[in-house]
Image (spheres, rainbow, N blue to C red):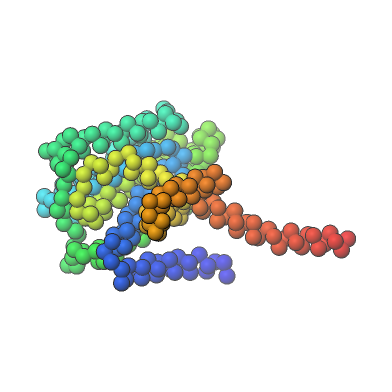
Amino acid sequence: MRAYLKPALLLVGLAALIVAPLGQGNYVIYLLSSWLIFSIAAMGLNLTLGYAGQISLAQASFMAIGAYSTAILTLAGWPWVVGMLLGVVLCLVVGLLLGFPALRVKGHFLAFVTLAFNSLVFLVSRNEEWLTGGIYGLSGMPRPSVLGFAMTKNLPFYYFTLFVFVVFCGLFYGIVRSPWGRAFKALRENPIRAESLGIDTRRLTLMAFAIGSACGGLAGALVTPLVQYIDPTSFALGHSLRILLMVVVGGAGYFFGPILGAAVVILMPEFLRFTEGYYLMIYAVLVIVLMIYCPSGLIGLGRKLRDLVRRKPVDRGDLKAGAQL
């Protein structure tokens, strides 16, 4: 029975995502599309941080590289798919290069390196007006057209984003369940022991940064046609911290953690708006309480509750047996 439970839950979740935007306004559809896009970026960071154990504060910068690459090419008349692929490849290469400092520095030193890279990308996008439009940004990017179907309206573009998200999740699941995924976990838990077992930790570190950066580039390529306007402030440090919050709140090292964390970070503030000026305070307090009592995130909290429920019947049985003796 349990073998069919997980596929059934996945089908129910997919059906819910298909039905969710029906009858909703443009703003709700925009929020749902943003949730899917940021989930992709957070899953990329989860591979780097949650699976490989490498701290990165530069995920928003890779979204910027993917977004600007796609925007420049689509404004020049290139198809969105071509611009997306080139942007992802560029992020893959840049992420590979950024991974080299991770071979020499660890912990908060690596965080400062990625922080500096995020600042560098922000300054380039703000000052190089001939390429990025500077502080005025780029606007008017066309939405993709697939097999003759235009995605000009929000609902068709949401379903296009959902399709990309589902395909991406399938590929990502294959990575984390492959021998590479197990090697990433070994690298996170104990790099010295992993190297003693014959795992090439240098190559794995570079791969973690490269693949995670490519995921950020894909998310940036989807942001471009969603908002049809980008500027440097859209990819500042605050957005990297926001993506990091998605990973930590959802549960670093869990497949569905970033998806759940992105839902909390993007959708939960909207549900708290009825509190008017207090919603940000309530949201911040809830996050602080979660991090204090369950650092493994919402997925970790759910697993603790599940284990607690499963242990209760056993404990009661033991008590009855002891009473009979």
> In the image, residue 27 lies at what x, y percent?
28, 61
User: Is 134 placed left or right of 301 in the picture?
Assistant: left
Q: Is residue 150 above or below residue 254?
A: below
In terms of image quadrants, where is residue 225? bottom left
Please tell me which residue is depicted at 48% across the width and 67% down the height of the picture.
Answer: 9
Who is closer to the viewer here, 44 or 299?
A: 299
Q: Position of residue 258 (x, y in %)?
A: 42, 51
Residue most extreme to the right: 325
In the rendered image, the quadrant that contains the N terminus is: bottom right
Q: Position of residue 171 (x, y in %)?
A: 38, 55
- Whether residue 179 is visible, yes or no, is no
- The front one of 303 and 182 is 303
Whether residue 113 appears in this view of the structure is yes
Residue at figure coordinates x 45%, y 50% from the top left: 282
Report the number of discs: 0
- Quarter that holds the C terminus: bottom right
Residue at horizontal 84 percent and vertical 59 percent from the top? 322
Indicate whether 127 appears above or below 274. above
Kindly identify the residue that appears in the image at 16 percent across and 47 percent down: 138
